[in-house]
Amino acid sequence: DIQLTQSPSSLSASVGDRVTITCRASQSISSYLSWYQQKPGKAPKLLLYATSTLQSGVPSRFSGSGSGTDFTLTISSLQAGDFATYYCQQSYRTPPTFGGGTRVEIK
Amino acid sequence: QVLLQESGPGLVKPSGTLSLTCAVSGDSINTINWWAWVRQPPGKGLEWIGEVYHTGSTIYNPSLKRRITISVDKSKSQFSLNLRSVTAADTAVYYCARKSFYYDTTGHPSAQAFDSWGQGTLVTVSS
């Protein structure tokens, strides 16, 4: 299975901050990476697919980049509703796998 | 807008079978999408269980393959999960989800992603 390692596992930030989360794959996954946001007690929500394509309805402050094994999710200006846990997920090989998550907390 | 709704027992005894159903509305189950199950143990990350196509074709996580069956009932627009010989380690929130395919500007496949999810149902394995 392809392992995805996210860093950091948690971070504290303030509203308005720029936040960057990284996801590293154990082997090349081309651009087959998606990002999800999950709030407590809720299902994950798809934010981006194909590394950098915003899902419909997702604010443009979210962006993604990378290819091969190293990827990043950036929130350009953190908003109150962005405090959540974020997961990366690869669809390059079966089984699809998820990173361990990054919890974004209020500073 | 597609809606997915999980249903099934919230408590299953050890060594028993966990059975869940996901009702799909707002989208035909007879599309190019696949229909998946994903679980999340309390306080932990996400694990893909497997998925089914409307033809009945399935793909399973090798780590669970011996114990799971996923099936589809097109007439009821629903798909189901059976997980046998459960233990406490199978305690989790179980989500059903739609897997969609995406293509680049040249028409080549560029991604697959779980773009719609049910709200999830907690299943506890305990005697």
Image (tube, coloured by chain):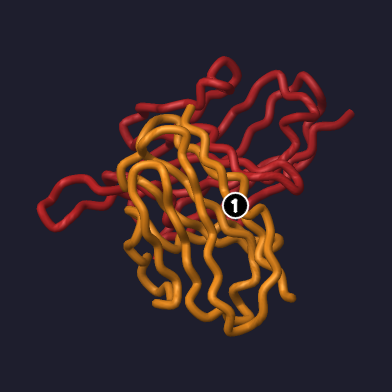
Q: In the rendered image of this protein, does residue B49 appear above or below residue B96?
A: above
* Image quarter of the C terminus of chain B: top right
Q: Colour of chain B?
A: red
- Mark 1 neighbour density, 10 Å: few (under 14) some (14–19) many (20 or more): some
The amino acid pointed to by label 1 is Ser
- Determine the colour of chain A: orange
| Residue shown at 26% from the left, 52% from the top | B102
Determine the residue located farthest toward the bottom in the rendered image.
A16
Picture coordinates of residue A41, whole percent (x, y): 70, 60
- Residue at left offset 21%, top offset 45%: B109
Q: Which residue is mark 1?
A: A7
Outermost residue to the right: B127
Q: Residue furthest left?
A: B106
Under tag 1, what secondary structure? strand
Residues B93 and B27: in front is B93
Residue B106 located left or right of residue B72:
left
Q: Chain of mark 1?
A: A
* B74 shown above or below B28: above
